[in-house]
């Protein structure tokens, strides 16, 4: 059997991915919307510090067809653990900030008209956001003591 060239092998792999896992048609437009929303948000510049995704795991689907997953982000000395759940009609993000500190968590989305939803972090570090629209969302964390600038998660999908 003749050896396959590297270029031919790459072409076969590329064709397989394009057939089995194509890029969503609206991906570029959705990412442009997310950047535009970030630029338009008051006080948010593109050089805003973003948290780093440390871990992602998927839970089993619920009995009613819902699905959930957990995300863990880190930034400086702050860890953020999220449980994201949606059942097609409702969505919920439960979060924990470690170490706990007084801050506001603001969900920013760009689907069906950009919007925000905000909540305060409890003294144990817990917060919840409910009934967020399905689609792309980013969480902005705003420390209340003013000793540091707000920081945000990268965009993720509910």
Image (cartoon, rainbow, N blue to C red):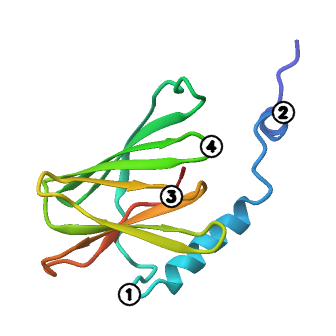
Front tag of 3 and 1: 3
Question: What whole-number distance in Å separates the C-alpha atoms at marks 4 and 2?
Answer: 36 Å
Badge number at residue 43: 1
Give residue 87's position: percent from left, percent from top.
57, 39
Badge number at residue 107: none
Question: What whole-number distance in Å separates the C-alpha atoms at marks 1 and 2?
Answer: 47 Å
Q: Which residue is mark 4?
A: 88
Give residue 92's position: percent from left, percent from top.
44, 48
Left or right of residue 115, residue 120 in this image: left
Q: Earlier in the sequence, mark 3 or mark 4?
A: 4
Badge number at residue 132: 3
Question: What whole-number distance in Å separates the C-alpha atoms at marks 1 and 4?
Answer: 33 Å
Q: Where 21 sits versus 132, above or below?
A: above
Front tag of 1 and 2: 1
Give residue 94's position: percent from left, percent from top.
34, 47
Residue at 80% across, 56% down: 25
Q: Earlier in the sequence, mark 3 or mark 1?
A: 1
Badge number at residue 12: 2
Q: Nearer the viewer, residue 137 or 134?
A: 134
Q: Nearer the viewer, residue 47 or 64?
A: 64
């Amino acid at each position: 059997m003749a050896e396959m060239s590297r270029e031919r092998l790459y072409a076969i792999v590329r064709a397989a991915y394009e057939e089995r896992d194509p890029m969503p048609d609206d991906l570029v437009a959705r990412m442009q919307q997310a950047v535009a929303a970030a630029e338009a948000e008051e006080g948010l510049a593109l050089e805003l510090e973003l948290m780093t995704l440390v871990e992602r795991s998927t839970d089993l689907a619920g009995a009613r067809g819902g699905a959930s997953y957990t995300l863990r982000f880190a930034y400086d000395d702050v860890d953020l653990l999220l449980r994201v759940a949606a059942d097609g009609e409702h969505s919920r993000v439960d979060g924990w900030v470690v170490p706990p500190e007084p801050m506001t968590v603001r969900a920013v989305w760009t689907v069906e008209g950009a919007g925000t939803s905000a909540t305060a972090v409890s003294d144990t570090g817990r917060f919840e956001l409910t009934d967020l629209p399905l689609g792309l969302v980013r969480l902005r964390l705003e420390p209340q003591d003013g000793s540091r600038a707000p920081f945000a998660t990268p965009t993720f999908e509910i």
